[in-house]
């Protein structure tokens, strides 16, 4: 469904991605692991059209994303949950959700249903729905960021380090959400540094180093032989 | 005492008109970082269009509506053709561009309507009496109307799907795009709204002092002062600052001539920049 | 712990260094001792406090409590330009080169800052010295053949190496390198590692890195930070064998 073929990307002069090839099929959870600074976030940004692509192709459901304007990706079914969460701080929780909920073609009953569904997953958001996004704690903002993406009823969510900086209890909650989304048939490209969570949630994992994909295996294989993980993510 | 009362009313009324002008300017700056030097000239063109429509139809309210719509359209066209290509460039470029637009608009007005002063007659005749003074009704009507329009703007921004789009884009353009909000369209719409408000201000202000090609400059100047004093991009702040600065100027006009009273505004500007550069009515940043 | 000059006192010592932002301790009670001439690697997962620590050393941030002793002198809380004059230099993650100047000019300006004087006559005579020093630095960082090139025309890797050259030209005794190989290709990384080895003589180097190959290959000693605290310290082999360190990185 989402295919990156030999993608090279630049930030200004810095050549940050080298021949990255990644595939996520419909309904799959795919992990993207690697240490800090290896280009995981850059890969997501390349998909979102935010890094200058100098070579390679990125297609979604067969359509080349090259000519698609930045605001067109949501309509295609691609949702992005960035590393920094990027909650609209001055908008209330509900207004944050509405940036995704207020789409053309969505009927009032479906809106209600979607909102209820998300409140069921994240009860705290219902409680805080009229509070400005900036007043939420880190974990709550992460949940809001994911909920906001769910408002788009996406086919795939690009999830960038959702557990970074969160307490273990919240990490478990995020893990549950990923499972639930998977059950709903939403594909997820999960960028993470948390290895156990990724191996648990994803069926396949790509491992990156220095701007390139260095290894690709199923979670089962990686769990069985820990050496690869140690080499690319350990010390 | 009567003087003070009259000047208070002047200050409030002028403040409301200025608030309409400034809110358009601050919205535009807040969302797309454009310093619009042509803002006062949008007001001026609005006043001329209003005067012409009034001359043809004799209906003030039609003139107000027509001017707002016409200048909104003009603003949208200008933004699409001149300013959109400049997105992402050095801010100096857009300053020069809007300055250039300002010159073009003034000369166009001169060509279209000639050099003589146009009149917009008062929509509401007569004066009312307050204590010992007589004050024109239409000025009060102007202030009330401006207030209603500003309230309408505030409501539009606060509720409503498009208000959320505008506010989200102002806070984080990239994330707004990622949520599917068509940011280029939002930019054009905001510029159109700002232009419409400037034009409406021009028609409202028309009966005060007549319509000339250069009437925009004073408004641009004061609007900039007010936008800085109120906090750039801060709508509530610019409204409060407009009233505050206009009142100060009016009171100063008791002692010095009105032309000199504008110095008060500059003093407020300088003090704001020195001590509270993010705006007088903005909570102190951490 | 490996030391190269066991007899001399450490060039840098921190005692109980703590930096609090509100309730959060970004750096928490960090005590470390770096001997003269050592290459010390500082690693740790995201948010471990590495950059905050560097910012303290170079005077960008003032520590909440604790001491930083450099060459026997307490430097905690001093402003950056004073610290620079005390011979601590730093390279940054975002390159700070002057894009409009040539490569030689970039380094010469840095070198001049060290030998600045007001006498016009003196200046004229010592100009040749400054240029010679700048050229020597360029040779060290492998940019000698690009001295007249505009800095903005260099490749990313070359720009980062120029950044190290600029820091080097201020003749520091302690050089702090902040993720020097970030965004570099494998080849550029190897070139930078060679560069650091070349310039390491007579210099003490602190290097923050995420690239394990680089750090394990270069450093004599490694300090591991986690949640602002020192988790472990030792030779590269010891650190790699330390299960607690693996745990922290792999979150197992």
Image: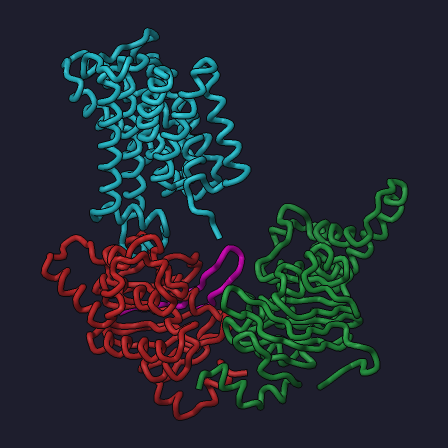
Query: What range of the chain is rendered magenta?
Result: A1-19
Q: In this view, does B171 lie above or below A15?
A: above
Chain letter for the part of the structure drawn in cyan: B
Q: Is residue C159 left or right of residue A136?
A: right
Q: Give the colour chain C carries in the figure.
A: green
Residue A194, x across and y down, in percent: 42, 79
Residue C178 x, y percent position in the rendering: 61, 66
Residue at coordinates 28% horizontally, 59% vertically from top-left?
Answer: A93
Vertical position of residue B234 compared to residue A205: above or below: above
Work out whether residue B154 or residue A197 is closer to the camera in this orientation and state it: B154
Residue A103 image point, x, y percent:
19, 54
> Would you say residue A10 sits in the magenta stretch?
yes
Query: Could one spot residue C216 in this view of the protein?
Result: yes
Camera sees residue B84: no
Given the current orientation, which residue lies at the most extreme bottom position? A224
Left or right side of C114 for B255: left
Q: Chain A is drawn in which colour?
A: red
Place residue C15 in its image quadrant: bottom right
Asked where in the image residue A21 lies, by quadrant, the reply is bottom left
Query: What residue is at 47 percent from the left and 38 percent from the top?
Result: B91
Question: Quick check: B85 left or right of B268?
Answer: left
- Is residue B194 located in the magenta-colored stretch of the structure? no
Q: Residue at x 33, y 84 (%)?
A: A200
Please state the horizontal and vertical placement of residue C132, each as a whole percent of the image.
Answer: 82, 55
């Amino acid at each position: 469904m989402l295919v990156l073929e030999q993608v090279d990307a630049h930030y200004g002069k810095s050549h940050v991605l080298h021949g990255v090839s990644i595939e996520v099929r419909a309904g799959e959870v795919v992990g993207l692991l690697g240490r800090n600074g290896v280009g995981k976030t850059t890969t997501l940004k390349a998909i979102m059209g935010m890094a200058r692509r100098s070579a390679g192709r990125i297609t979604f459901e067969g359509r080349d994303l090259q000519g698609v304007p930045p605001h067109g990706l949501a309509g295609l079914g691609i949702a992005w949950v960035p590393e920094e969460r990027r909650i609209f701080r001055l908008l209330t929780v509900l207004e944050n959700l509405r940036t995704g909920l207020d789409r053309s073609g969505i009927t009032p009953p479906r809106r209600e249903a979607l909102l209820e569904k998300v409140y069921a997953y994240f009860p705290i958001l219902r409680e805080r729905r009229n509070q400005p996004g900036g007043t939420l704690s880190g974990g709550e903002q992460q949940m809001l960021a994911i909920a906001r993406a769910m408002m788009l009823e996406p086919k795939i969510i690009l999830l960038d380090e959702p557990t970074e900086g969160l307490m273990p209890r919240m990490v478990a909650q995020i893990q549950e959400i990923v499972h639930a989304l998977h059950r709903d048939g939403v594909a997820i490209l999960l960028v993470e540094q948390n290895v156990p969570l990724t191996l648990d949630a994803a069926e396949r994992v790509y491992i990156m180093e220095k701007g390139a994909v260095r290894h690709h295996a199923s979670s089962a294989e990686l769990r069985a032989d820990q050496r690869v993980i140690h080499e690319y993510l350990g010390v | 005492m009567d003087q003070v009362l009259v000047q208070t009313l002047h200050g409030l009324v002028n403040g409301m008109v200025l608030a309409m002008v400034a809110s358009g300017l601050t919205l535009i700056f807040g969302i797309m970082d454009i310093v619009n030097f042509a803002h006062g000239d949008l007001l001026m063109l609005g006043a001329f269009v209003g005067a012409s429509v009034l001359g043809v139809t004799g209906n003030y309210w039609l003139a107000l509506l027509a001017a707002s719509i016409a200048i909104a359209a003009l603003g949208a066209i200008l933004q699409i053709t001149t300013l959109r290509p400049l997105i992402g460039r050095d801010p100096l470029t857009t300053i020069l561009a809007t300055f250039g637009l300002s010159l073009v608009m003034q000369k166009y007005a001169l060509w279209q309507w000639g050099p003589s002063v146009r009149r917009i007659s008062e929509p509401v005749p007569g004066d009312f009496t307050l204590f010992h003074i007589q004050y024109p009704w239409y000025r009060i009507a102007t202030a009330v109307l401006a207030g209603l329009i500003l309230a309408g703007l505030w409501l539009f921004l606060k509720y409503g799907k498009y208000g959320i789009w505008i506010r989200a884009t102002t806070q984080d353009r990239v994330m707004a795009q990622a949520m599917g909000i068509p940011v280029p369209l939002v930019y054009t719409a905001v510029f159109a709204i700002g232009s419409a408000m400037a034009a409406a201000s021009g028609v409202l202000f028309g009966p005060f002092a007549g319509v000339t090609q250069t009437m925009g400059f004073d408004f641009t100047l004061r609007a900039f002062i007010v936008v800085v004093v109120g906090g750039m991009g801060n709508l509530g702040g610019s409204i409060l600052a407009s009233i505050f600065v206009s009142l100060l100027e009016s009171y100063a006009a008791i002692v010095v001539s009105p032309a000199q009273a504008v110095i008060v505004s500059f003093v407020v500007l300088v003090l704001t920049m020195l001590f509270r550069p993010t705006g007088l009515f903005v909570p102190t940043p951490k | 712990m490996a030391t190269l000059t066991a007899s001399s006192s450490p060039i840098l010592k921190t005692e109980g260094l703590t930096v609090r932002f509100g309730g959060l301790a970004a750096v928490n009670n960090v005590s470390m001792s770096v001997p003269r001439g050592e290459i010390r690697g500082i690693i740790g997962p995201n948010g471990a406090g590495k950059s905050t620590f560097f910012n303290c050393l170079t005077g960008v941030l003032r520590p909440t409590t604790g001491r930083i002793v450099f060459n026997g002198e307490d430097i905690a809380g001093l402003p950056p330009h004073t610290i620079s004059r005390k011979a601590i230099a730093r390279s940054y993650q975002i390159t700070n080169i002057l894009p409009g100047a040539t490569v030689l000019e970039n380094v010469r300006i840095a070198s001049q800052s060290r030998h600045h004087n007001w006498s016009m006559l003196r200046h004229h005579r010592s100009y040749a010295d400054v240029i010679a020093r700048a050229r020597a630095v360029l040779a060290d960082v492998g940019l000698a053949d690009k001295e007249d090139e505009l800095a903005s025309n260099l490749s990313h890797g070359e720009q980062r190496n120029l950044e190290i050259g600029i820091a080097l030209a201020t003749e520091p005794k302690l050089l702090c390198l902040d993720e020097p190989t970030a965004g570099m290709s494998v080849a550029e990384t190897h070139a930078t590692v060679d560069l650091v080895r070349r310039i390491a003589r007579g210099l003490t180097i602190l290097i923050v890195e995420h690239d394990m190959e680089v750090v394990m290959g270069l450093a004599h000693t490694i300090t591991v930070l986690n949640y602002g605290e020192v988790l472990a310290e030792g030779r590269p082999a010891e650190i790699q064998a330390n299960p607690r360190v693996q745990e922290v990185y792999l979150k197992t």
